Image (tube, helix red, strand yellow):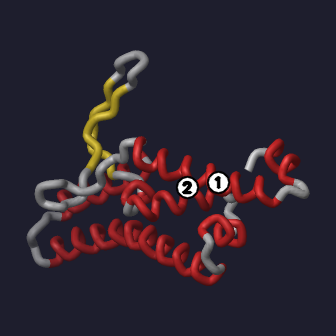
Amino acid sequence: MWNWRKRAALGRPWINKLDYVFDNIYSMVHFIIVPRVPAQCPSCSAQLRIRRLGCPSCSTQLEGDYELPGLLQLPAEDLAFVTEFVRASGSLKEMARIEGQSYPTIRNRLNQIIERLERTSRSRELKQHEILDAVARGELTAQQAAKLLRQLDAEDEGR
């Protein structure tokens, strides 16, 4: 809520309800209108990667192979929840009020989102192990593995 709205709401509970309605309408409209970066291929459901970035102001183009940040890999509903959580200054109590749900329900939802984010970071560790296992099986040389591991490190630095 904005400060002037807080001051206006003192002693007028209907303003708090109206504020809640407007905030929810804004969130829904923003969620529907603002295009979301797709995280999965519509054809085969594989994880998409960013290949090109462009500046609309000066037309500068960057090309490479960039992984989507963990937050953008979340489902749309979870991303909306995280956005609202940040707007609520990270207050679970405020989120419970906004969502009209109990504190434990909000806490559980946040725990699920944290778990999803941790899974995306664990996927990097899994890639490292796959590369090392390929060396152990003789499918990759040490030089090829070193190159792949450096690429993984470069991707992390690019984030």
Name which residue lies at 55% across and 55% down: 83
Q: In terms of depth relative to the viewer, which is nearer, 99 or 112?
A: 99
Q: CA distance from mark 1 to mark 2?
A: 6 Å
Q: Which residue reaches farthest bottom?
A: 104
Q: Please provide percent x and percent y for residue 117.
A: 44, 68
| Apparent side of residue 110 relative to residue 64 in the rendered image (left or right) | right
| Apparent side of residue 2 relative to residue 28 in the rendered image (left or right) | right
Q: Please provide percent x and percent y for residue 123.
A: 33, 69
Assign a secondary structure to mark 1. Answer: helix
Q: Please provide percent x and percent y for residue 16.
A: 76, 57
Name which residue lies at 22% across and 72% down: 130
Q: Which residue reaches farthest right?
A: 11
Q: In terms of depth relative to the viewer, which is nearer, 35 or 146?
A: 35
Q: Label 1: how many residues lie within 10 Å, few (<14), some (14-19) or many (20+)?
A: few
Q: Are marks 1 and 2 in contact (CB under 8 Å)?
A: yes
Q: Where residue 98 is drawn, which disc sits there?
A: none
Name which residue lies at 61% across and 76% down: 101
Relative to 99, say whether 158 is above or below: above
Q: Which residue is mark 1?
A: 87
Relative to 92, say whether 37 is above or below: above
Q: Amino acid at mark 1?
A: Arg
Q: Please provide percent x and percent y for residue 57.
A: 43, 18
Q: Which residue is mark 2?
A: 83
Name which residue lies at 12% across and 60% down: 44
Relative to 154, say whether 71 is above or below: below
Q: Which residue reaches farthest left?
A: 139
Q: In terms of depth relative to the viewer, which is nearer, 112 or 30?
A: 30
Q: Which quarter of the picture shows residue 46? A: bottom left
| Apparent side of residue 44 relative to residue 87 in the rendered image (left or right) | left
| Apparent side of residue 76 relative to residue 145 in the rendered image (left or right) | right
Q: Amino acid at mark 2?
A: Thr
Assign a secondary structure to mark 2. Answer: helix
